[in-house]
Amino acid sequence: MLAICGGKIFTMNGDVLEQGCILTEGGKILAVGAGIDIPADCERFDATGKIVTPGLIDAHTHLGVYAEPTEWSAEDGNETSAPVTPAMDALDAVNPADIAFDDALAGGVTTVMIAPGSANAVGGQCVVLKTQRRSTVEDMLFKRHAGLKIAFGENPRRVYGDQQKAPVTRMATAYLVRETLQKARNYLKKKGTKDFTPDFGMDAVLRVLRHEMPLRAHAHRADDIMTALRIAREFDVDIVLDHCTEGHLIAPELARLQARAAVGPQLITRAKMELKDKSYRTPAVLAEHGVQFALVSDHPVVPNMFLSVYAGLAVRFGLPPLTALRAVTSDPADILGIGDRVGRLAPGYDADIVVWSGDPLEMASKPEKIWVGGSVADLAADNGGTATWQPK
């Protein structure tokens, strides 16, 4: 049993405790409050003068499937042999030895969603892992089948246009996504008949049709965002907008459609045409219109260990601080469908806890102590991105 006491606790569950305690046991939070009873034999951690938050959650990364160093042998995110590959599963490509997991942990990031890349119109299935690096990916697994990656815009057109096969245009990309969803409908109708043939790809798409996981739609431009939402409405499926770069241009419409987004990476240049209207104000504008979103790194596009810094950057451009903190804790948890276990400090939740040296939205602040499911990380003295684990 462990008690973390004395710090300013952001529960992300509606309360900010100026001086509170968190009681944990067996990897779970037992109690959170200002005056809870602490057993005499309980281990204590003094967080006086510190900030305490849930472990941060990055709702869109490619950790482990684009492992570091990033070179050809470590690039397993895009199966470019065909533009429609729903059977692909990011879990099968994750290298648990990727040192970037240590970096993430050292930055206070305890949970990540890992997706295939964006070369394909339909790219494969996403997975959610905890960032404590273990010998096998199974030991890191938190949620399998966390979404079906689809991609609009430049990437599929460039990859397959260069091969002189579809999709060469945005029309073809949308068609391929629709065709895949319709094939899954037909596949479902054949189940139990003599004409039925099992298909791993169609089984993956059925998870979307059954609302067991959402589409995860790579979309930067406003027109691509609206195409993704249009297709989701046509097939009555759940969807999360990844990147949503021009979301600020259509924020009222996104609010009307109750869209959810994983916004980022913000700290990049306008590296291609569909980023020409990117804005650091996008998170603030979405928040002003009541759109639920997470702030994401898209690691390794930008290092995911600095997720708290990207949240602070959004504050610089108008996002309220508490909203920014929600965007890397409770909101990504809810968007990923894991909001009943992580993203908040409340009884019954995983003991994923970070003690910060100062305001986590300030660049100079850093994690001083981190627990993931009751295990404590022994961070390197310079907090430069290495962490070893001492299970409890």
Image (cartoon, rainbow, N blue to C red):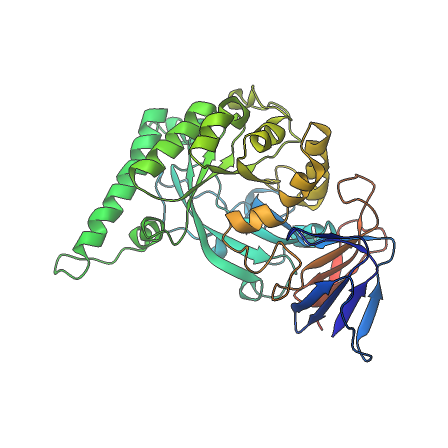
* x and y percentages locating residue 309 in the rendered image: 73, 39
In this orientation, which residue lies closer to the viewer: 252 or 186?
A: 252
Residue 95 appears in which quarter of the rendering? bottom right
Q: Which image quadrant: the C terminus?
A: bottom right
Give the residue drawn at x 70%, y 69%.
Answer: 24
Give the residue drawn at x 76%, y 68%.
Answer: 36
Q: How many marks?
A: 0
Q: Is residue 294 above or below residue 128?
A: above
* x and y percentages locating residue 196 in the rendered image: 17, 57
Give the residue drawn at x 79%, y 76%.
Answer: 42
Residue 287 appears in which quarter of the rendering? top right
Residue 169 appears in which quarter of the rendering? top left
Q: Residue furthest front?
A: 35
In this orientation, which residue lies closer to the viewer: 55 or 266?
A: 55
Q: Is residue 250 above or below residue 64?
A: above
* x and y percentages locating residue 247 in the rendered image: 52, 28
* x and y percentages locating residue 379 in the rendered image: 79, 58
Q: Residue furthest bottom?
A: 41
In this orientation, which residue lies closer to the viewer: 310 or 273?
A: 310
Residue 390 visible, this angle: no
Residue 199 visible, this angle: yes
Q: Is residue 124 above or below residue 369?
A: above
Q: Which image quadrant: the N terminus?
A: bottom right
In the drawing, does residue 53 fall left or right of residue 207?
A: right
In the drawing, does residue 86 fall left or right of residue 295?
A: left
In the drawing, does residue 57 fall left or right of residue 78?
A: right
